[in-house]
Image: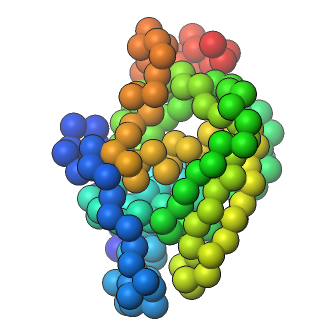
């Protein structure tokens, strides 16, 4: 396993639509190694989600690992480490809620983003099996944020008011109450 370099906002690869994982790629050593490297990279940087484009790999692969417990979003239920390949989101209810989001590719900043809070995700597992999951609240926000990376979108693109973009230090001092 290898800890990969996370590319930052401004790198052109973050703005490109990632390529789908093809059926021939499932079971291949390269895909397995990519996911292992993504897990090690995610755990090394202390994040809860990572998309392949963030390590400069143009594939529709994302991982999410939410330890659960108290957080700046309140008490969060855990989600075990899961790999999502070629995910598709369906919004089940367009009602939105907002959170100050952060991103490993936009280090040091937080920005207020409103997102749908009830979604369904269809994806393929690392084993090549189709799967679905329905998500609400914070989890729906996390998944939309990570999967945006697969389409070349950063959370700052989703902000309605750039006055709600702040450095993490100022966020912890002045902006911890949701807008």
Q: Quadrant of residue 173?
A: top right
130 up-or-down from 119: above or below: below
Residue 152 picture location, percent across and down: 33, 45
Does any portion of residue 138 appear in the rendered image?
yes
Instruction: Give the image quarter of residue 1.
Output: bottom left
Give the x, y percent position of residue 142. Answer: 60, 44
Instruction: Determine the residue positioned at 39% across, 28% down.
Output: 157
Q: Position of residue 90 (x, y in %)?
A: 63, 49
Q: Is residue 125 left or right of residue 51?
A: right
Residue at the location (62% across, 39% down)?
A: 141
As drawn, is 157 to the left or to the right of 126? left
Left or right position of 126 against 135: left
Q: Nearer the viewer, residue 178 or 45?
A: 178
| Pick the front one: 45 or 124 | 124
In this rendering, the answer to whether 59 lies above or below 144 is below
Q: Is residue 177 above or below residue 143?
A: above
Nearer to the camera, 151 or 61: 151
Q: Nearer the viewer, residue 113 or 42?
A: 113
Residue at the spot 19% in from the left edge and 45% down from the top edge? 12
* Number of residue marks: 0
């Amino acid at each position: 396993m290898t800890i990969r370099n996370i590319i930052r906002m401004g790198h052109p690869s973050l703005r490109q639509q990632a390529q789908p994982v093809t059926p021939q790629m499932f079971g291949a050593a390269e895909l397995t190694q990519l996911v292992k490297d993504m897990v090690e990279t995610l755990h090394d940087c202390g994040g809860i989600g990572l998309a392949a484009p963030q390590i400069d790999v143009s594939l529709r692969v994302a991982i999410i690992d939410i330890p659960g417990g108290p957080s700046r979003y309140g008490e969060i239920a855990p989600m075990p480490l899961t790999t999502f390949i070629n995910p598709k989101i369906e919004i089940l209810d367009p009602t939105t809620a907002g959170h100050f989001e952060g991103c490993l590719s936009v280090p040091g900043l937080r920005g207020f983003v409103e997102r749908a809070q009830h979604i369904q995700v269809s994806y393929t597992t690392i084993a090549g099996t189709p799967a679905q999951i329905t998500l609400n609240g914070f989890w729906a926000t996390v998944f939309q944020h990570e999967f945006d990376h697969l389409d070349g979108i950063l959370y700052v693109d989703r902000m309605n008011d750039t006055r709600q973009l702040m450095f993490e230090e100022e966020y912890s001092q002045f902006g911890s109450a949701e807008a």
